[in-house]
Image: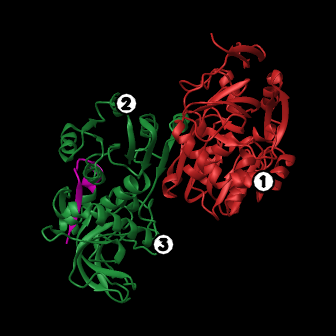
Chain colours: A red, B green
Amino acid sequence: MGETMQAVVVDGDAPLVLGEVPKPELRANDVMIEVKAAGLNRADLIQRKGMYPPPPGASEIMGLECAGIITEVGAGVSRWKVGDRVCALLAGGGYAEFAAVDEGSVLPIPNTMDFADAACLTEAMMTVWANVFQRCQLQESEVFLCHGGTSGIGVMAIQMARHAGAGAIYTTAGSAEKCKVATDLGADAAFNYRETDFAEEISTRGGVDVVLDMVGGDYVQKNIDILKVNGRVCNIAYQNGPVVELNLMKLMLKRAILTGTTLRARLEEEKRVIRDAVERDFWPAVVNGTIKPILDSTFPIAEAEAAQAKMAAGGHIGKIVLLR
Amino acid sequence: MGETMQAVVVDGDAPLVLGEVPKPELRANDVMIEVKAAGLNRADLIQRKGMYPPPPGASEIMGLECAGIITEVGAGVSRWKVGDRVCALLAGGGYAEFAAVDEGSVLPIPNTMDFADAACLTEAMMTVWANVFQRCQLQESEVFLCHGGTSGIGVMAIQMARHAGAGAIYTTAGSAEKCKVATDLGADAAFNYRETDFAEEISTRGGVDVVLDMVGGDYVQKNIDILKVNGRVCNIAYQNGPVVELNLMKLMLKRAILTGTTLRARLEEEKRVIRDAVERDFWPAVVNGTIKPILDSTFPIAEAEAAQAKMAAGGHIGKIVLLR
């Protein structure tokens, strides 16, 4: 069966454990990364339950991003070399000793940044760019609402919108502590959804141009209702469910857009476009520390079960990362 | 009260009659059109019931488009002169002797075209461009579905999509006769919605990139379900209602867009952009007869009641027009 490696394996409902699996194959445009740190994403929990299967050709192992050291490069790889410290977006396979990925999904780790911090960046920044900037075209001085302001996505969305010159940034979070973190990161106002109705608060303030939402459920109508003319709502998940009753009249009268995207299933060429944009528009701010990785906690990879339990509990702020 | 003119007046639920009303005022960038023909739109019926009030500053009189002769131009008007034969998009006021409108909403009537035919063009062509080409960016060789294929909008959408090089054009209509008209106009297939499920038919054929819909109701989910990746659905009305239960998961997984727009409430600058695009990209085809006005029937303006009754009954194909 060729070379093997260690990886976190799913065995029905049993707790996650490390097992021996085949090492990924290296295609011509791939780099092989020895994983030092792997970021958790909520999608991992859904995949584990069998509801978010990897796209065709992708690793069956969980893990949508990693940071590590390149150990091998394919014949077609031009930019990277063995020994480079990199972080990468993965279609799967991060919870492992090695991950192989197209060179267009890879970014260089800034010199002074460690692997744990670097594992917080790629999935969130590429998701934010693809949704907020590419799909929704957030413009300078436009008003932006990001739900889940202290999620792995939220902490990056706030910082990136601030860096891009958004006119005002609103966010929602589930506690006063989380709201404080969000405003410290650059949000102009953070609404504790357990205590206030974000839609009322934001209507009073004049509405928003762009909403990034991962909640779904009854948030969808509220998101539409608070849009300004030509506003856009983009969903990257539906944690409260994708089935909703909507009155679409306001969508039409405001000439608004309801959309959503996922990153994982896209072609490698599309991911390369997104990587290029993140590197061009936001990576300099990562390098100089203006945009910061927000690391909640780290777990040894052998304790992936505990790491996922922490994410499921929802008390975290920023990223949970596995270390090898 | 200054000059007066004749216009169709609404008096509660009483039948429409001609009455004496103030002649519209001419602003600096307006032209005054002596109306020879006025196109009916379904929105007129809704406005009559009090549910689609004119935007601030617009005429209270029904009528969203007209064709006629310019009798006066404002001090700021550069392009048009008294005597020009023109057709125009109106924010209201078409069912009248005179209509005043910003010069940017006006198009020249081709030499060989009469006023009745010219009154079929502006509202439909500008609506189609603003939704199918501006908002949804229909590209050459993409697949297009237009509901209501023999409505005033539908007959223009089919012809414009064909002219723009759409890969395939599907449409729905309510009878075999209407389906025949739609395919004669350039649709590749027309589905009689009383007999077949358009969503099944189109799924079998591989789906669509862009949908123009005025039906709403249970069409909305079907429209989403038959989209290809990166597909777009645009509503210009919700004749079966704007309140719908939707499963948005496919919207996200296909990175699709659900949107809608109206023309009437837009700024005059925006209408000018739309007029310019229609004139640049489609008016030459109107002039040379490739794109044809589809006139269902004409009524003397004094018989506006009968004209609207015909539209409400729904048997028409193309435009119903009032003549003076």
Write the residue at 67% across / 42% down.
Answer: A107
On the rendered structure, is B202 left or right of B54? Answer: left
Callout 1 secondary element: strand
Residue at the far left: name it.
B112
Q: Quadrant of the C terminus of chain B?
A: bottom left
Q: Are marks 1 and 2 on the same chain?
A: no
Amino acid type, callout 3: Pro
The quarter of the picture where residue A79 lies is top right
Mark carried by residue B203: 2
Q: Chain of mark 3?
A: B
The quarter of the picture where residue A218 lies is top right
Amino acid type, callout 1: Ala
Q: Nearer the viewer, residue B94 or B124?
A: B124
Instruction: Mark 2 or mark 3: name the one nearer the start of the chain.
Output: 3
Residue identified by numbered label 3: B56
Callout 3 secondary element: loop
Q: Is residue A13 magenta?
A: no
Q: Which residues are magenta?
A: B309-324
Residue A108 placement (x, y as % from top left): 70, 43
Q: Is residue B323 magenta?
A: yes
Q: Quadrant of the N terminus of chain B?
A: bottom left
Nearest to viewer (mark 3 / mark 1): 1
Residue A135 visible, this orientation: yes
